[in-house]
């Protein structure tokens, strides 16, 4: 059963022997490897080189900024239709292919791996054993094996997105630690928020059963509020665009013509080559963070000067060189730029609606 596998991963994790004293990681690593071997006898490890390179590269960069960079961190993807992830003692992290498919950007993948790495770096396995959480999971495993009607409720505790087997305090601690880790990497810490938001939507769409008295994890709302508060506390603006991968901007050039692209499609062609295109993209970057509506984009003429505005922000002023290069008057160019930007924003919103973003 899909949910049963997730429960089994968690029980394998909890069944590992206690870690060695602080400063000695050998027995902890061995415990994790033994549990990992059991997982790999159950689930097929993905061997695609590009997938493994991406997960390993990002995972190791995140692990390097944790409290325990010296561990032999290993990141693997296993085939499974249920979105889940598990961190084993000693730095062995498994992500299912279904969860990897839900991740939209490297920012969100870094957030996922940072959350899992936090469980290891903060020694959550040892704390779980001291708090005797193993009993609850064994009850859930029995329910799965018995095909009890309450299975969906119990399994949700360990199979809901990146929930592994950790209780309220430890899940929240891992979420907040992930924010701190990502601030020390090239990836955006808002990825923690956008990933949790997406997983919460997936969980709602899957019709998961309310775990009620079996709940040992924070609710999605609790986790989202805690992460939002941590981002605000650290002075990180809650702009989701880059982390979630929408309204992506890039620049290119064709000879002397600069190209501004949204989601890989050229929407603005200007004189001045890549340098001018980069200036326009920089202004768009700021206004795109506010997730504008297509209706916010307009061409504005003041005396002989025509510009394109998004809201009240001028993102592009049509120059005499634009007019000369393209053989069009300033008014026509401004209206064309505005229309293409409106179309790009509208298309991006349609795509996000279809994808549930």
Image: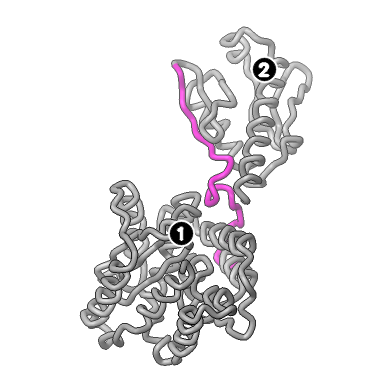
Horizontal arrangement in the rendering, residue 273 relative to residue 15 (left or right): right
Residue at (49, 87) in percent of width and height: 139
Tell me whether circle 2 and circle 1 mark residues in contact (CB < 8 Å).
no
Q: Report if residue 266 lies within the magenta region.
A: no
Question: How is colour applied across the structure in the image?
Answer: one colour
Start and end of the magenta stretch? 232-254
Across and down, in percent, residue 91 comes to 31, 71
Coordinates of residue 81 in the picture (x, y in percent): 46, 59
Q: Which mark is residue 260?
A: none
The vertical placement of 17 against 98, above or below, is below
Q: Quadrant of residue 317?
A: top right
Residue placed at 57% from the left, 44% from the top?
A: 246
Residue 247 highlighted magenta (yes or no): yes
| SS assignment at label 1 | loop
Provide the residue designation for mark 2: 333
Q: Is residue 348 above or below residue 49?
A: above
Q: Up-down: is 333 above or below 108? A: above
Residue 24 on image: x %, y %: 23, 82
Pick whichever, 126 or 298, lies toward us: 126
The reply to whether residue 123 is visible in this rendering is no
Q: Which mark is residue 81?
A: 1
Q: Residue at x 44, y 86 (%)?
A: 138
Q: Is residue 57 left or right of residue 241?
A: left
N-term-proximal mark, 2 vs 1: 1
Front in this rendered view, residue 149 or 72: 149
- In which image quadrant can residue 222 be found? bottom right
Q: Residues within 10 Å of mark 1 (few under 14, many from 20)?
A: few
Q: Residue at x 46, y 78 (%)?
A: 165
């Amino acid at each position: 059963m899909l949910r049963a596998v997730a429960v089994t991963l968690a029980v394998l994790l909890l069944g590992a022997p206690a870690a060695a004293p602080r400063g000695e990681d050998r027995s902890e690593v061995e415990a994790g490897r033994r549990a990992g071997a059991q997982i790999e006898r159950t689930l097929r490890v993905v061997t695609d080189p590009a997938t493994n390179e991406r997960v390993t590269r990002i995972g190791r960069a995140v692990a390097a900024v944790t409290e325990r960079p010296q561990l032999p961190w290993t990141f693997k993807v296993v085939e499974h239709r249920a979105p889940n992830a598990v961190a084993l003692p000693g730095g062995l992290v498994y992500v299912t292919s279904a969860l990897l498919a839900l991740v939209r950007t490297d920012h969100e993948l870094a957030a996922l791996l940072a959350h899992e790495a936090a469980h290891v770096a903060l020694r959550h396995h040892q704390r779980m054993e001291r708090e005797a959480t193993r009993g609850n999971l064994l009850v859930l495993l029995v329910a799965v094996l018995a095909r009890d009607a309450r299975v969906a409720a119990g399994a949700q505790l360990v199979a809901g997105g990146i929930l592994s087997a950790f209780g309220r305090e430890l899940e929240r601690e891992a979420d907040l630690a992930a924010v701190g880790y990502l601030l020390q990497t090239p990836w955006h810490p808002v990825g923690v928020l956008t990933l949790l938001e997406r997983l919460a939507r997936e969980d709602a769409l899957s019709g998961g059963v309310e775990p009620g008295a079996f709940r040992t994890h924070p609710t999605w709302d609790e986790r989202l509020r805690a992460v939002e508060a941590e981002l605000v506390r650290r002075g990180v603006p809650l702009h989701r665009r880059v982390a979630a991968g929408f309204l992506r901007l890039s620049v290119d050039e064709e000879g002397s013509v600069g190209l501004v692209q949204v989601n890989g499609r050229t929407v603005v062609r200007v004189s001045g080559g890549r340098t001018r295109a980069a200036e326009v993209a920089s202004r768009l970057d700021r206004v795109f963070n506010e997730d504008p509506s297509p209706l916010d984009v307009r061409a504005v003429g003041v005396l002989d000067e025509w510009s394109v505005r998004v809201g009240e922000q001028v993102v592009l002023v049509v120059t005499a060189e634009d007019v000369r290069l393209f053989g069009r008057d300033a008014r026509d160019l401004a209206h064309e730029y505005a229309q293409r930007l409106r179309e790009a924003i509208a298309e991006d919103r349609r795509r996000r609606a279809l994808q549930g973003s």
